[in-house]
Image: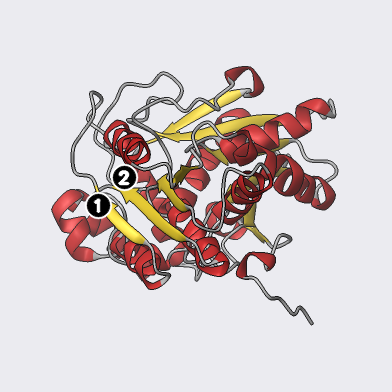
Amino acid sequence: MPIITSPQEFNVDDLYVDLRQVIDRPLYLKCEGFNFAGSVKLKAAAAMVEAAAADGVLTPGSTLVESSSGNLGIALGLIAASRGLRFVCVTDPRCNPASMRVMRALGADVRVVAETDANGGHLGARVRYVRELCASDPGYVWLNQYANRNNWLAHYRETAPAIDRAFPDLEILFVGAGTTGTLMGCARYFRERRRPVTIVAVDAVGSVTFGGLPERRMVPGLGTSSRPDLVDESLVDDVVHVAEPDTIRTAHALSARGFLFGGSTGTVVSGASRWLEAKYPGEDPVAVAIAPDLGERYLDSIYEDGWLRELFPELLPGLAEIHRH
């Protein structure tokens, strides 16, 4: 039986869901939400903290600070608590209320920046706040998930090899694009080994990561209003953009079958399903998608009637129909 002393030591890395009965497509979903942080971000958070400590940048008196829409903030809050460090998470109004409550329960100082940037998002304003905070006091340490190579290295060393072991004949890998750490780490791993794996990035409509036009985005997780420094488009074979109504419908289709996943997973599965139907109609390729988190943190948003009625009222009749079947 596993016995651990630090919460980041535990992570289920070999659980997959066969989605054929749910979406009628050949797709295996790698579940990354079964750890104490509840998401794939625990890997990147641990790698970035360990590297900063090894380099002497992070000391016992330091205060960690990071911009996050939720999951990385929770992961860093968990690690900071286990190390006895202070942590400031700079987020925005789109962050799930449940995620804020989890961070605060872990002892984090959560600061919400409502100001928008030139693209109508909050990322630029969040990063500017972080820079100002660090300039005000050298005790603050910003790991900068958007440019930190240890973000993608965590997935190069852990996530991609785990998928490779489970599916040695893998043909297609779908990865959601946020900071693009998971995407870049997995893509580099398969490229360097000259594996014939098609890497498909799944992004949100309204995200500028791959040159899209900025639009309103209400589901936290994937997509950016400022292009991350980690992006290397040469490592990606194709990009699928998913509109938020499709994200929400897919998440509800999964929950209606007992699989309660988060909004990011709804986006990835929706994009993967559409791509497979267009590229491999009636065929049976070996395809894997990565589910970044589970659904409990989205109970106040994509699974909540009041939130849906306010932002996506046209979806309610269809979602009710999904759950009746």
**Circle 2 sits in a helix, a strand or a loop, which is it?**
helix
Q: Does the rendering let one see residue 108?
A: yes
Left or right: 5, with 314 as reference point: right
Task: Residue 252 in the image: state x and y as whole percent.
Answer: 39, 60
**Residue 235 figure quarter:** top right
Residue that carries the numbered disc 2 in the rendered image: 245
Pointer 2 and pointer 1: residues touching (CB < 8 Å)? yes
Task: Residue 105 in the image: state x and y as whole percent.
Answer: 38, 73
Q: Amino acid at mark 2?
A: Pro
Quadrant housing the C terminus: bottom left
Q: Does the rendering let one see residue 174?
A: no
What is the number of the mark on residue 14? Answer: none
Question: Looking at the image, is 157 positioned above or below residue 259?
Answer: above
Question: Looking at the image, is 62 positioned above or below residue 104?
Answer: above
Residue drawn at x 58%, y 19% as measured from the top left: 233
Residue drawn at x 52%, y 26% as measured from the top left: 239
Decide which of tag 2 and tag 1 comes sooner along the chain: 2
The local crowd at label 2, few if under 14, some if 14 to 19, many if 20 or more residues have their Cα within 10 Å, is some
Residue that carries the numbered disc 1 in the rendered image: 315
Task: Residue 161 in the image: state x and y as whole percent.
Answer: 79, 46
Viewer-nearest residue: 238 or 165: 165
**Residue 31 figure quarter:** bottom right
Viewer-nearest residue: 172 or 112: 112
Quadrant housing the N terminus: bottom right
